[in-house]
Image: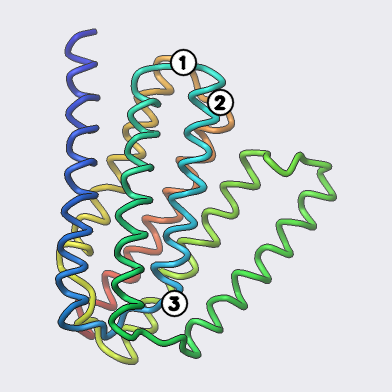
Amino acid sequence: MKKFDLFGDTLFVIQLFAAICFCGAQIYVFTNNIKGASITWILFWLGFVFINLVLSIQAFLDMKDRIIKQTVINYAAWTLSITATLSVLLWQGAKWSQVDSFTSFIVAVGFIGLIIFKIKKNLNIYNPRLKAGTAILLKAVPQLMLAYNIILFGGGGIATYTIIIGHIMINLRILQVSLSAKIVGWDENRKSIVFGELGNELSWIVATIAWIFFR
């Protein structure tokens, strides 16, 4: 059990460190170059991590354990880091673009679909499946549109660290929640977090490919 706790604690520290480093690295790049970066990419990313923060808090309240508590802290750290990064992007003069408008349109249509699904299934608005769907809309769609934005304008405003650490952190979060599920089981909140993160990873792969070839 001690080894298990040590592994979980190691993941916890790595993710906290990564959140801090992301903030520093991406802000540093933004002070010199914002090409390829879209407002909706950061804005909806903030929404994504905030939703997962809420999901993890609910999971902790439903069935408390050490690892899910650490997950709550990690999502809180990422929420603060992304908020700071978005603030700098706007401060550097980023403007709302057609890509942002189109991204918002797709997300809005997706939300309408979720509302229809909620009504047909008679689900509570706080149902984890609805939150997972919302998370995918706020992360996967903007990242796919980020790839398109990079193709149009280049990816000089996206830090190399952001690209690399994105893949590492997504998979570490999935692993962390999976470890928690081994202890207390797979409830709807934990399943929803993992489902949302899988959509996050697939779309980030597409953005990464665009960044490699068009930056």
- Residue 131 is marked as none
- Looking at the image, which is closer to me, 141 or 86? 86
Q: Which amino acid, mark 1?
A: Val
Which residue is tagged 2?
187
Label 1 close to label 3 by CB (< 8 Å):
no
State which quadrant residue 69 falls in. Answer: top left
Which one is in front, 38 or 79?
Answer: 79
- The x and y percentages for residue 36 are 30, 83
Q: Are marks 2 and 1 in contact (CB under 8 Å)?
A: yes
Gap between marks 2 and 1 measured at Cα: 8 Å
Q: Residues within 10 Å of mark 1 (few under 14, many from 20)?
A: few
Q: Position of residue 210 (x, y in %)?
A: 29, 78
Q: Are marks 2 and 3 in contact (CB under 8 Å)?
A: no
Of the numbered discs 2 and 3, the one sitting upstream in the chain is 3
Disc 1 target residue: 184
| Residue 134, x across and y down, in percent | 59, 55
Q: Which mark, by number, is residue 145?
A: 3
Q: Which comes before the other along the chain, label 1 or label 3? A: 3
